[in-house]
């Protein structure tokens, strides 16, 4: 749970909220009080937002480039719950501003961030209220201003894209990455799992970034960091919105659920796409509009250890229909789990563990006494069949 809080803090500080919120966060952490401006949303409602990270934009109209990282999120302000959905950049969907189907990363080239916002909203059937656009150049400079990031590189990474001025050459092992190397680390996707592995890598990077941000040395760089964020982040959140969120979450982060858009890679007309699983989009929409639903049964977190997109979500859906309280859905540390593992964190839960095995049709149980807010942690393996 501690890691999850750090991840959420990082998303808010560096991606969801630009310079004004970064300043608000530090004001909130201090003993100072400040008056809040009116918000554009209800302080007790649920807001939805789109986060887009841009590529270099070399050779593209206006130098804008394509959307390289896409996240859709929702935040239930009353209950302090959130849901973040990663959308692979090759996702095939109908783009209204183009009038035909294309990869989602092309929408922003057609008519800006609002075209992406409209296309994703139509795909999920959920209105998206707010957007945040982050330029890759600012990302590099922010990491450099922080003094670089220490992180474990999970594999050798070698790739060259001259049109993007992208020259990736990273060695496996613990590394100290500067801004450019960090950009290479989060953008690399030339492996079997493609975007699925990259999303996991980006989550680990955000955690490492947060650990750096919490160091005392960062305060001395705050003016420069604010300037970079201000120059390189575009959003329709108002100043009042940002200050409200900074104050609300300065002490306690919301409960967060994460997932990847369900689907599978597919080649159509010689072009590689990520084809959404239309049958499961309704469940995704429900989770966006009602982040982390409340039920009366045992508390369960479900992690995808199989690498199959949407596997954790499908397992969670089966469990929630029979009264289990799904507190978190996300990715495991690895996608190479062959067998589903059911970790029991509370005594006297063996009967529920057996029921979980029956519902999922697979799974080995193991007692785990590590501290957890959940009764069970389920790591989905390749033996799980939706």
Image (cartoon, rainbow, N blue to C red):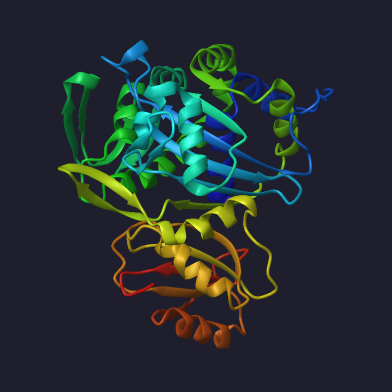
Instruction: In the displayed orientation, state which residue is furthest to the front.
Output: 99
| Towards the viewer: 79 or 116 | 116
Give percent across and percent down for residue 181: 30, 27
Specify whether residue 233 is in view.
yes
Give me the residue at 54% from left, 74% from top.
Answer: 319
Q: Quadrant of residue 300?
A: bottom right
Depth check, front residue: 203 or 46: 46
Instruction: Please tell me whether residue 233 is drawn above or below residue 319 in the rendered image.
Output: above
Say which of 153 and 342 sits in front. 342
Q: Is residue 285 left or right of residue 303?
A: right
Q: Tell whether 384 sits left or right of 17.
A: left
In the rendered image, the quadrant that contains the C terminus is bottom left
Q: Residue at x 54, y 48 (%)?
A: 125
User: Residue 368 location in percent, x, y?
Assistant: 51, 73
| Depth order, front residue of 372/337 | 337
- Residue 370: x and y in percent read 54, 66
Query: Relative to 126, is 363 above or below?
Result: below
- Residue at 40% across / 55% down in the picture? 262
Q: What x and y, as percent, mark residue 71?
A: 47, 39
How many numbered badges does the structure rendering display?
A: 0
Res 214 visible: no
Relative side of 297 to 135, left or right: right
Residue 61 drawn above or below residue 71: above
């Amino acid at each position: 749970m501690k890691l999850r809080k750090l991840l959420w803090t990082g998303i808010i500080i560096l991606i969801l909220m630009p310079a004004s919120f970064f300043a608000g966060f530090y004001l909130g952490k201090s003993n100072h009080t400040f008056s809040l401006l009116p918000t554009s949303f209800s302080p007790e409602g649920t807001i939805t937002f789109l986060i887009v990270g841009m590529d270099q934009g070399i050779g593209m109209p206006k130098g804008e480039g394509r959307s390289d990282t896409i996240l859709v999120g929702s935040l239930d302000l009353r209950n302090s719950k959130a849901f973040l959905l990663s959308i692979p950049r090759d996702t095939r969907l109908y783009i209204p501003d183009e009038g035909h189907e294309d990869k989602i990363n092309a929408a922003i080239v057609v008519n800006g961030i609002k075209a992406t916002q409209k296309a994703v909203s139509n795909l999920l059937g959920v209105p998206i209220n707010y957007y945040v656009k982050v330029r890759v150049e600012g990302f590099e400079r922010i990491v450099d201003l922080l003094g670089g990031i220490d992180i474990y590189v999970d594999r050798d990474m070698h790739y060259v894209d001259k049109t993007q001025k992208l020259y990736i050459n990273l060695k496996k092992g613990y590394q100290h990455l500067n801004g450019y190397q960090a950009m290479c680390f989060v953008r690399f996707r030339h492996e079997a799992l493609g975007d699925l592995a990259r999303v996991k890598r980006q989550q680990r990077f955000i955690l490492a970034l947060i650990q750096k941000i919490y160091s005392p040395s960062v305060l001395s760089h705050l003016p420069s960091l604010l300037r970079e964020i201000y120059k390189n982040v575009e959003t329709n959140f108002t100043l009042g919105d940002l200050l409200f969120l900074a104050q609300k979450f300065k002490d306690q982060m919301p409960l967060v659920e994460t997932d990847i858009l369900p689907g599978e890679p597919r080649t159509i007309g010689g072009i590689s796409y990520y084809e959404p699983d239309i049958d499961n989009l309704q469940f995704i929409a429900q989770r966006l509009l009602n982040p982390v639903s409340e039920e009366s049964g045992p508390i369960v977190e479900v992690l995808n250890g199989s690498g199959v997109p949407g596997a954790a979500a499908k397992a969670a859906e089966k469990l929630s229909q029979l009264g289990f309280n799904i507190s978190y859905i996300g990715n495991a540390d690895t996608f190479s789990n062959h067998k589903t593992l059911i970790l029991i964190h509370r005594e006297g839960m063996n009967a529920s563990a057996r029921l979980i095995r029956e519902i999922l049709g697979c799974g080995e149980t193991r007692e785990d006494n590590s501290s957890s807010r959940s009764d069970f942690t389920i790591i989905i393996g390749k033996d799980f069949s939706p």
